Image (tube, grey):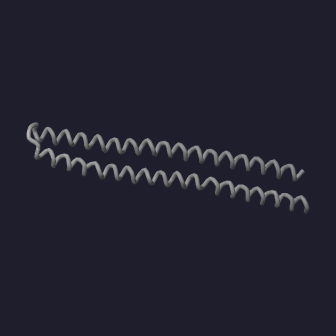
Amino acid sequence: MKKLALVAIILLAGCASSNARTSDSDPKLAQLEKKSLAIAESEKRCIDETPIRSRDKMAGMAATPGASVESQRQSENDERDREISQCRAWAGQENAEIAEQERNEYELQAQQERSRASFMAIVTTSTMH
């Protein structure tokens, strides 16, 4: 009976420390999620502002004599598309870094969980004998 009580106490202590460690890791994941949302907002803002700049430049071109308006317009459309691509590329790179950090955090949590499970298996086996 004493051995059973000892095993129960050890298991409860192990579970309590497991829950504490898991909740410590969750803020890291939440922080990465916030970063991801901020990147998405920045990307959207970047993409939304690009056509506005493009329209402003096009309005200025209409008043500028010289080169063909169609040629200038095509050039500005190409520039707008390039800027949008840059917005997306930047966001993609940032999201890839966040995804790597999340993978690392999940791997760390899994390793900690395996270590705790191994420890608990050793402790419960040794207290039973």
> x, y (%) of residue 19?
69, 58
> x, y (%) of residue 75?
19, 38
Question: Quick one: 15 or 36, which is closer to the camera?
Answer: 36
Which of the 4 quarters of the picture holds residue 18?
Answer: bottom right
Question: Quick one: 120 or 69, which is closer to the camera?
Answer: 69
**Which residue is depicted at the point 58% across and 52% down?**
28
> x, y (%) of residue 100?
53, 42
**Which residue is depicted at the point 84% across and 57% down?**
7
> x, y (%) of residue 61?
14, 44
Viewed as shown, does residue 101 lie left or right of 19? left
Which of the 4 quarters of the picture holds residue 20?
Answer: bottom right
The number of numbered discs placed on residues in the rendered structure image is 0
Question: Quick one: 59 or 88, which is closer to the camera?
Answer: 59
Viewed as shown, does residue 88 lie left or right of 55? right
The residue most toward the left is: 65
Viewed as shown, does residue 69 lie left or right of 96? left
Which of the 4 quarters of the picture holds residue 16?
Answer: bottom right
Viewed as shown, does residue 117 lie left or right of 67? right
Which quadrant: the N terminus? bottom right
**Which residue is depicted at the point 64% across and 57% down?**
23
**Which residue is depicted at the point 64% across and 48% down?**
109
